[in-house]
Image (cartoon, grey):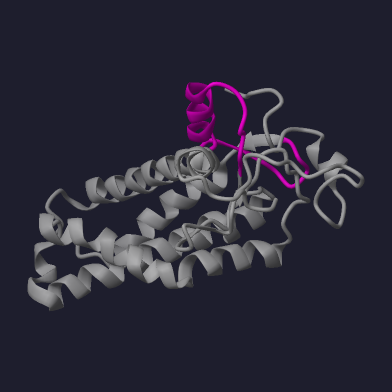
Protein backbone atom coordinates (compact mmCIF):
# COMPACT_ATOMS: atom_id res chain seq x y z
CA UNK A 1 0.00 0.00 0.00
CA UNK A 2 1.49 3.34 -1.08
CA UNK A 3 0.96 6.28 1.27
CA UNK A 4 0.63 9.89 0.19
CA UNK A 5 2.70 12.75 1.61
CA UNK A 6 5.17 10.47 3.33
CA UNK A 7 8.85 11.28 3.81
CA UNK A 8 10.82 10.56 0.69
CA UNK A 9 7.69 10.86 -1.45
CA UNK A 10 7.72 12.28 -4.96
CA UNK A 11 8.85 15.89 -5.14
CA UNK A 12 10.76 16.12 -1.87
CA UNK A 13 14.12 15.60 -3.51
CA UNK A 14 13.56 18.36 -6.06
CA UNK A 15 12.35 20.79 -3.44
CA UNK A 16 15.14 20.15 -0.97
CA UNK A 17 18.10 19.21 -3.20
CA UNK A 18 20.40 21.92 -1.83
CA UNK A 19 23.96 21.60 -0.51
CA UNK A 20 22.76 21.97 3.07
CA UNK A 21 20.10 19.32 2.64
CA UNK A 22 17.11 21.59 3.41
CA UNK A 23 15.42 24.51 1.70
CA UNK A 24 17.31 27.79 1.97
CA UNK A 25 15.74 30.39 4.28
CA UNK A 26 13.64 27.68 5.93
CA UNK A 27 14.05 27.28 9.71
CA UNK A 28 15.11 23.75 10.64
CA UNK A 29 12.44 21.62 12.29
CA UNK A 30 12.51 21.69 16.08
CA UNK A 31 10.94 18.27 16.66
CA UNK A 32 11.35 14.67 15.60
CA UNK A 33 15.08 14.94 14.93
CA UNK A 34 17.42 11.97 14.94
CA UNK A 35 20.86 11.83 16.60
CA UNK A 36 23.74 10.00 14.95
CA UNK A 37 23.83 7.79 18.06
CA UNK A 38 21.03 6.89 20.44
CA UNK A 39 22.11 7.25 24.06
CA UNK A 40 25.66 7.63 22.78
CA UNK A 41 25.83 3.93 21.88
CA UNK A 42 23.37 2.66 19.27
CA UNK A 43 24.42 3.78 15.78
CA UNK A 44 21.65 5.67 14.01
CA UNK A 45 23.37 6.62 10.77
CA UNK A 46 20.43 5.49 8.59
CA UNK A 47 17.84 7.72 10.24
CA UNK A 48 16.66 11.07 8.84
CA UNK A 49 14.75 13.46 11.08
CA UNK A 50 11.13 14.52 10.57
CA UNK A 51 10.58 17.12 7.83
CA UNK A 52 14.23 16.94 6.76
CA UNK A 53 14.64 15.93 3.12
CA UNK A 54 18.29 15.57 2.17
CA UNK A 55 19.52 14.88 -1.35
CA UNK A 56 19.93 11.20 -2.29
CA UNK A 57 23.11 9.61 -0.95
CA UNK A 58 25.94 9.08 -3.38
CA UNK A 59 27.44 5.63 -3.93
CA UNK A 60 30.29 6.65 -1.63
CA UNK A 61 27.84 7.71 1.08
CA UNK A 62 25.94 4.43 0.78
CA UNK A 63 29.21 2.56 1.24
CA UNK A 64 30.09 4.68 4.27
CA UNK A 65 26.71 4.01 5.92
CA UNK A 66 27.17 0.26 5.46
CA UNK A 67 30.73 0.41 6.79
CA UNK A 68 29.89 2.53 9.82
CA UNK A 69 27.00 0.24 10.74
CA UNK A 70 29.16 -2.88 10.30
CA UNK A 71 32.35 -1.87 12.11
CA UNK A 72 31.23 0.71 14.63
CA UNK A 73 32.42 -0.23 18.11
CA UNK A 74 28.85 -0.98 19.15
CA UNK A 75 28.55 -3.58 16.37
CA UNK A 76 30.89 -5.88 18.30
CA UNK A 77 28.75 -5.61 21.43
CA UNK A 78 25.47 -6.19 19.59
CA UNK A 79 26.95 -9.24 17.85
CA UNK A 80 27.63 -10.71 21.30
CA UNK A 81 23.99 -10.15 22.28
CA UNK A 82 22.73 -11.65 19.02
CA UNK A 83 24.93 -14.72 19.35
CA UNK A 84 23.87 -15.61 22.89
CA UNK A 85 20.27 -16.81 22.17
CA UNK A 86 21.54 -18.95 19.29
CA UNK A 87 24.21 -20.42 21.53
CA UNK A 88 21.73 -21.18 24.33
CA UNK A 89 19.22 -22.73 21.91
CA UNK A 90 22.01 -24.81 20.30
CA UNK A 91 20.57 -24.22 16.83
CA UNK A 92 23.81 -25.61 15.39
CA UNK A 93 25.00 -28.36 17.77
CA UNK A 94 28.20 -29.01 15.83
CA UNK A 95 29.52 -25.56 16.74
CA UNK A 96 30.27 -26.84 20.22
CA UNK A 97 29.96 -25.61 23.79
CA UNK A 98 31.79 -23.36 26.18
CA UNK A 99 33.70 -20.26 25.14
CA UNK A 100 34.93 -21.93 21.98
CA UNK A 101 31.39 -22.79 20.93
CA UNK A 102 30.13 -19.32 21.82
CA UNK A 103 32.95 -17.84 19.73
CA UNK A 104 31.74 -19.89 16.77
CA UNK A 105 28.29 -18.36 17.12
CA UNK A 106 29.72 -14.90 17.75
CA UNK A 107 31.74 -14.49 14.56
CA UNK A 108 28.84 -15.82 12.50
CA UNK A 109 26.45 -13.32 14.09
CA UNK A 110 28.91 -10.53 13.41
CA UNK A 111 29.28 -11.67 9.81
CA UNK A 112 25.49 -11.87 9.40
CA UNK A 113 25.13 -8.24 10.41
CA UNK A 114 28.02 -6.99 8.28
CA UNK A 115 26.90 -8.85 5.16
CA UNK A 116 23.33 -7.65 5.70
CA UNK A 117 24.48 -4.05 6.05
CA UNK A 118 26.47 -4.10 2.83
CA UNK A 119 23.61 -5.79 0.98
CA UNK A 120 20.83 -3.45 2.17
CA UNK A 121 22.76 -0.18 2.60
CA UNK A 122 25.25 -0.32 -0.26
CA UNK A 123 25.11 -3.05 -2.92
CA UNK A 124 21.38 -3.27 -3.65
CA UNK A 125 20.67 0.46 -3.14
CA UNK A 126 23.43 1.15 -5.67
CA UNK A 127 22.05 -1.35 -8.19
CA UNK A 128 18.40 -0.35 -7.77
CA UNK A 129 19.05 3.37 -7.11
CA UNK A 130 17.19 3.24 -3.81
CA UNK A 131 17.67 5.21 -0.62
CA UNK A 132 17.78 2.79 2.32
CA UNK A 133 17.66 5.47 5.00
CA UNK A 134 14.74 5.66 7.41
CA UNK A 135 12.78 8.91 7.00
CA UNK A 136 11.08 9.75 10.29
CA UNK A 137 7.39 10.59 10.00
CA UNK A 138 7.08 12.32 13.37
CA UNK A 139 3.42 13.35 12.88
CA UNK A 140 0.03 11.80 13.42
CA UNK A 141 -1.38 9.12 15.66
CA UNK A 142 1.02 6.70 17.25
CA UNK A 143 -0.63 3.65 15.68
CA UNK A 144 -0.32 5.16 12.22
CA UNK A 145 3.33 6.06 12.86
CA UNK A 146 4.03 2.47 13.93
CA UNK A 147 2.33 1.21 10.77
CA UNK A 148 4.38 3.64 8.71
CA UNK A 149 7.61 2.46 10.36
CA UNK A 150 6.83 -1.18 9.54
CA UNK A 151 5.78 -0.30 6.00
CA UNK A 152 9.29 1.04 5.33
CA UNK A 153 10.43 -2.58 5.17
CA UNK A 154 8.59 -2.76 1.85
CA UNK A 155 8.47 0.86 0.66
CA UNK A 156 11.45 3.17 0.26
CA UNK A 157 12.25 6.25 -1.82
CA UNK A 158 14.44 5.85 -4.85
CA UNK A 159 17.19 8.29 -5.74
CA UNK A 160 14.72 10.33 -7.81
CA UNK A 161 12.46 10.86 -4.81
CA UNK A 162 9.58 8.51 -5.67
CA UNK A 163 8.46 5.72 -3.37
CA UNK A 164 9.13 2.23 -4.69
CA UNK A 165 9.23 -1.38 -3.51
CA UNK A 166 12.12 -1.84 -1.10
CA UNK A 167 14.20 -4.37 -3.01
CA UNK A 168 17.25 -3.39 -0.96
CA UNK A 169 15.65 -4.55 2.28
CA UNK A 170 13.60 -7.55 1.19
CA UNK A 171 15.93 -9.02 -1.43
CA UNK A 172 19.13 -7.82 0.25
CA UNK A 173 18.26 -9.54 3.51
CA UNK A 174 17.23 -12.65 1.57
CA UNK A 175 20.61 -12.79 -0.16
CA UNK A 176 22.33 -12.29 3.18
CA UNK A 177 20.38 -15.20 4.68
CA UNK A 178 21.31 -17.38 1.71
CA UNK A 179 24.99 -16.48 1.91
CA UNK A 180 24.88 -17.58 5.53
CA UNK A 181 24.78 -21.15 4.27
CA UNK A 182 28.43 -20.71 3.26
CA UNK A 183 29.53 -20.42 6.89
CA UNK A 184 26.72 -22.01 8.93
CA UNK A 185 26.85 -25.83 9.30
CA UNK A 186 24.39 -27.82 7.22
CA UNK A 187 23.47 -29.73 10.38
CA UNK A 188 21.11 -27.17 11.89
CA UNK A 189 18.23 -28.43 13.99
CA UNK A 190 15.60 -27.52 11.37
CA UNK A 191 17.28 -28.13 8.03
CA UNK A 192 19.06 -25.77 5.64
CA UNK A 193 16.04 -24.19 3.95
CA UNK A 194 14.12 -23.67 7.18
CA UNK A 195 17.15 -22.13 8.88
CA UNK A 196 17.74 -19.86 5.87
CA UNK A 197 14.13 -18.66 5.93
CA UNK A 198 14.35 -18.22 9.68
CA UNK A 199 17.44 -16.01 9.36
CA UNK A 200 15.72 -13.94 6.66
CA UNK A 201 12.54 -13.40 8.67
CA UNK A 202 14.51 -12.63 11.83
CA UNK A 203 16.48 -9.94 10.00
CA UNK A 204 13.32 -8.40 8.56
CA UNK A 205 11.60 -8.52 11.93
CA UNK A 206 14.56 -6.92 13.67
CA UNK A 207 14.72 -4.11 11.11
CA UNK A 208 10.99 -3.53 11.51
CA UNK A 209 11.35 -3.16 15.29
CA UNK A 210 14.37 -0.90 14.76
CA UNK A 211 12.30 1.34 12.48
CA UNK A 212 9.61 1.63 15.16
CA UNK A 213 12.23 2.45 17.78
CA UNK A 214 13.76 5.10 15.50
CA UNK A 215 10.35 6.60 14.79
CA UNK A 216 9.50 7.06 18.45
CA UNK A 217 12.98 7.79 19.80
CA UNK A 218 12.54 11.59 19.46
CA UNK A 219 9.33 11.32 21.53
CA UNK A 220 11.02 9.13 24.13
CA UNK A 221 14.09 11.33 24.41
CA UNK A 222 12.07 14.57 24.62
CA UNK A 223 9.02 13.68 26.67
CA UNK A 224 10.29 10.85 28.86
CA UNK A 225 14.04 11.34 29.20
CA UNK A 226 13.87 15.13 28.78
CA UNK A 227 16.91 15.17 26.55
CA UNK A 228 17.86 18.02 24.23
CA UNK A 229 16.71 17.60 20.65
CA UNK A 230 19.30 16.52 18.11
CA UNK A 231 20.19 18.92 15.31
CA UNK A 232 18.67 17.95 11.95
- Residue drawn at the location 75% of the way across and 51% of the way down: 56
| Residue 160 lies in the magenta-colored region | yes
Does residue 190 appear in this view?
Answer: yes
Residue 213 % position (x, y): 45, 42
Image quarter hosting the N terminus: top right
Does residue 133 appear in this view?
Answer: no
- Residue drawn at the location 32% of the way across and 46% of the way down: 202
Residue 173 % position (x, y): 44, 51
Residue 22 vertical position relative to residue 66 in the rendered view, above or below:
above
Residue 94 vertical position relative to residue 4 in the rendered view, above or below:
below
Residue 99 % position (x, y): 13, 76
- Residue drawn at the location 55% of the way across and 48% of the way down: 168
For this view, does 120 lie left or right of residue 81? Answer: right
Residue 123 % position (x, y): 58, 60
Q: Residue furthest bottom?
A: 100
For this view, does 1 lie left or right of residue 28? Answer: left
Residue 70 vertical position relative to residue 222 in the rendered view, above or below:
below
- Residue drawn at the location 70% of the way across and 43% of the way down: 158
Q: Which residue lies furthest to the right in this view?
A: 25
Q: Residue furthest front?
A: 226
| Residue 136 lies in the magenta-colored region | yes
In front of the other: 209 or 36: 36
Amino acid sequence: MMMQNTPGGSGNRIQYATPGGVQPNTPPPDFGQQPKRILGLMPNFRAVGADVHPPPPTVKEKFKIATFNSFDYSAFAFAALDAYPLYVAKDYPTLGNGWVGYGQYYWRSFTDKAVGNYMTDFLFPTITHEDSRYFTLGHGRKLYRAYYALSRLFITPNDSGSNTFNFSEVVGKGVQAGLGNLYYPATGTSGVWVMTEQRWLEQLGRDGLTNIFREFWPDISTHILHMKQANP
